[in-house]
Amino acid sequence: MATTYKTPGVYVEEIVKFPPSVAQVETAIPAFIGYTEKATNKINGDLKLQPTRITSLLEYERFFGFAKPETTISVTINDVATENGDTRSIVVDQPTVKQPFLMYYSMQLFFANGGGPCYIISVGRYGDDLDEDDSQITAINNIDALNDGLLELEKVDEPTLILFPDATKVSGINSTDFYGLYNNALMQCQNLQDKFTLIDTLSYDESSPTDSNIDDLRAKISSEKDTIKYGAVYYPHLETILDYAFDSNKIILKHYSYTAKAYDQIATGLAGIENATTGIDATVANLIDVTTAPGNISGQMSDLLLQMYSNDATGFDLGGTFVSDPAKKTAFLDKLNILLASLENLSLLKNSLNDEANAAISTISDEDMNIATGISNALTAFNSNFIGTDKIDSVYKNLKALKKKIQDENATTKLLKIISTDAVSFDKELRKLVDYTNLNTQTGITLVTNNFSGIQANLLSLLNTIKSVSGKDVNNGALNGRKLNTLETIDNATFNKILTEIYNLPITLPPSAAIAGVYARVDRDRGVWKAPANVSLNYVIKPTVKITNTIQDNLNVDTVAGKSINAIRTFTGKGTLVWGSRTLAGNDSEWRYVPVRRFFNMAEESIKKATEQFVFEANDANTWIRVRAMIENFLILQWRAGALAGAKPEQAFYVRIGLGQTMSAVDILDGKMIIEIGMAVVRPAEFIILRFSHKMQES
């Protein structure tokens, strides 16, 4: 506003009458630090170690993928003949070696329990969607990557909760390292004063009333009161109704039957592989035929190579001057599609043969291990033509990728690179399968190496060893040794029953993700000042440990170190409830309760952000009045919502600021504006005591 007036006219002055306001910050924005299938927004890997805000499970799936499929789920089918007819039972057991990556399941549990916006920090990827500098994670060997993710979280202001869904699955981890990770998180919370850590126990012991995991936690977690007030522990782990992700191509069936029909099913599968017109031998002959003339080849490989080198109207003339036009590219793609179709058929036949060979191994291994070993060795020899660097499978994959490139490209120079110059090009890929002399006449291909040549001999050897199983099987049914994915067409009813049993397997998870969802739900429905306890958990079957009042006595009150642990319990008619709301500082009268600590976090952060606008303002009474009014208005709203105790606002809080109250003249000279705020935050009624007595009869 103008302070001097020199030109005649009308001037408008706007006078500030209202104090500024305090905007309440979010209170339940978790940061999940762990391993994901991918971390991709626009290009592969662009979200790795980047704290990324999402608001739904759909967004998580888009950016970070899904769970890693289980491969070791055991499926056993038993057929029994009874007087009332044949009966079939199906037994499905938990995976023998479970995947260690729990992030996706934790996200499902979080959103099912009321979770909303959250942050994901991907510290490693277990899928295939990776950038060139990334490598696929198969196991979690240490907590270094999780600590790296924690450091990245420090740079982001919005998250208020810290979780490590995968920490319990670090292979061979000891309690010192495990709780050391949580100590680092608690220290970050103490330094920033705006976050809170949800802590899981390393494991659980459902058979013992005195779980050693509780003692390990109390021994290894920091004992500093100013640190542990920023965290809470929940116990035990939870059995959930979530479904395992599984790879049906890796689950092998065991089928025991009074009628041995395993080899009959194998023989049926081999029929297509041996078919004279569509089987493996016939497909290879279509790809490359060496019977036309010594040293020369014909077939689909030759057709494509000649089209590349030919100098006629449709050829690219690699041996001369490369020329391209739409007609040449169309002719090339026509021949390429024929070749790719045969390679695809060969790959499918190879996979079918592997299925039959593995079924034969499973069928005969309990009868004659020598035959089983022979089949395994013959299968390895056969697969050597397909699997490995520069083998048929990898070339087929690269040719499909090159097909898309050439379809999308029209520039002559770039087409030349795709066909013959680039490191991955048609010429170089085709030479991996059929190496040939440089063309001079451009009318025939002279063979140097034929990498299809071993298929026929290896196929014959493998088929003979598989057929030796015939008649030697005594107790395996038709489905024995088969992969689950092949069962859908063979026996759809049994396939669906097996799927039902797999989906009924409970997944056990640490409780922190569910608790983060509860925090978000309670904060949204009631407020951060409401204790997130006596609240039911969704998607939970039961806690892994049945906690009684006696057991909880020791969890809730720790007379030695004061480290309280919140129990999750099942009550008849009520389901599974969170039955505790204490921070780790359970013996501290100030910071004993989770809602008190988290309300202070919210109030401190909200007021801090609101008062930043007064930095470098005049440190005088005018500013002090505006600051005090701003904070008092905010706290009155909290009092009306029920967060502060007191019949009147002055009984619920106070705000002091001014010379002689909170500041001395020296403080003002030093540029310090000191505000003192006191709040009577409501505390949960943790113990409700009903006192009864006899009353004398009066009439």
Image (cartoon, rainbow, N blue to C red):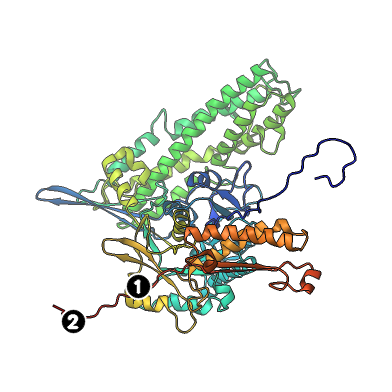
> CB atoms at circles 1 and 2 under 8 Å apart?
no
Q: Is residue 535 visible?
A: yes
User: Residue at horizontal 50%, vertical 29%?
Assistant: 341
Marks 1 and 2 sit apart, C-alpha to C-alpha, by: 26 Å
> Which numbered circle lies on residue 696?
2
Report if residue 152 is visible in the image: no
Residue 196 in the image: x percent, y percent?
A: 55, 65
Residue 483 vs residue 554, the one in the foreground: 554
Q: Quadrant of the N terminus?
A: top right
Q: Residue at the spot x=17%, y=49% of the render?
A: 87
Q: Which of marks 1 and 2 is in front?
A: 2
Q: In this view, does 44 lie above or below 364?
A: above
Badge 1 crowding class, 10 Å Cα cut-off, few under 14, some 14 to 19, many 20 or more, is: few
Residue 583 versus residue 126 in the image, above or below: below
Between discs 1 and 2, the one toward the N terminus: 1
Q: How many labels does the image show?
A: 2
Q: Position of residue 178 (x, y in %)?
A: 53, 70
Q: Residue at x 56, y 77 (%)?
A: 225
What's the residue type where badge 2 is placed? Answer: Met
**Quadrant of image for the C terminus:** bottom left
Q: Between 456 and 683, which is closer to the camera in this rendering? A: 683
The furthest residue to the bottom:
560
Residue 344 in percent (x, y) is at 49, 33
Task: Identify the residue at image location x=36%, y=66%.
Answer: 544
User: Residue reaching furthest right?
Assistant: 6
Residue 446 percent coordinates (x, y): 64, 30
Q: Which residue is more in the foreground, 419 or 672?
A: 672
In which quadrant of the rendered view does residue 417 lie?
A: top right
Question: Badge 2 local density, few (<14 within 10 Å), some, or many (20+)?
Answer: few
Q: What element carries label 2?
A: loop
User: Residue beneath label 1, please?
Assistant: 688
The kind of residue tagged 1 is Ile
